[in-house]
Amino acid sequence: MEELSCHILDLARNSLEAGATGLEITITENPEENLLEFQVRDNGRGIDEKDIPRLMDPFFTTKQCKKVGLGIPLLLHAIKTCGGTLKIKPLPEKGTEVTACFPYHHLDRAPLGDLPGTLSVLLTAENYVDLLYRHKYKQDTFIFDTKELRSQLGEVPLKNPVVLTWLQNYLNNELNNLRGGKTIENVGRTGQFTGKTSGRHENPRKK
């Protein structure tokens, strides 16, 4: 997978296939601390602690309809390529949390990729899901919550093509604003830059 957003989408789909109705995706970018981290957290049926090491084996899967499970092994390969870390843990009550950390400036660290497109794809899934998305860049945080958007849309579904088109543009603009006007596409492979409605921004320095 060329972009980290593809890994995020794969993990999120696993969550939906595990029966999750609540999904939290958190991205943390801190170039000054050489950190890029993403976390996918769900309320699905979870995983046994003893099965976690086996997830690294491409020939192990908990899905009855498949004989291989390449998602986690591919993510692990992307992480190891640049000396990052991967942590998978079952949550106390229900669900799973996957956290992947990368050195922000490593030459082999894949770019984040098309995050607005990834979120839009998730919202077109058959499963009903409440999605909470947080994107932290240095001290600022952008938050997007489908519960808030659904309350504004009323009976108009999130899957409506007009809504999805608007949503992608909106997320693109907000994420660009979060990074000080630099576009996602201008974030190079090394993480270096070469080039408000239902969401909200938080900056603790301004409080």
Image (cartoon, helix red, strand yellow):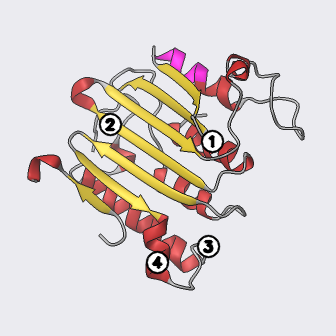
Say left or right for 54 vs 176: right
Residue underneath mark 4: 151
Q: CA distance from mark 2 to mark 4?
A: 29 Å
Say left or right for 109 vs 88: left
The residue most toward the left is 206
Pick the residue in front: 140 or 169.
140
Residue underneath mark 3: 159
Image quarter (top left, top right, bottom left or bottom right) of the N terminus: top right
Q: Name which of mark 2 and mark 1 comes first in the sequence.
A: 2
Highlighted magenta segment, given as a residue range: 76-82
Tag 2: amino acid: Glu
From the image, state whether disc 4 or disc 3 is nearer to you: 4
Picture layout, residue 16 above or below residue 144 = above
Q: CA distance from mark 2 to mark 1?
A: 28 Å
**Residue 156 on image: x %, y %:** 56, 83
Residue 185 on the magenta segment: no
Q: Residue at x 30, y 55 (%)?
A: 176
**Residue 47 on image: x %, y %:** 70, 32
Picture layout, residue 33 above or below residue 3 = above
Tag 1: amino acid: Lys
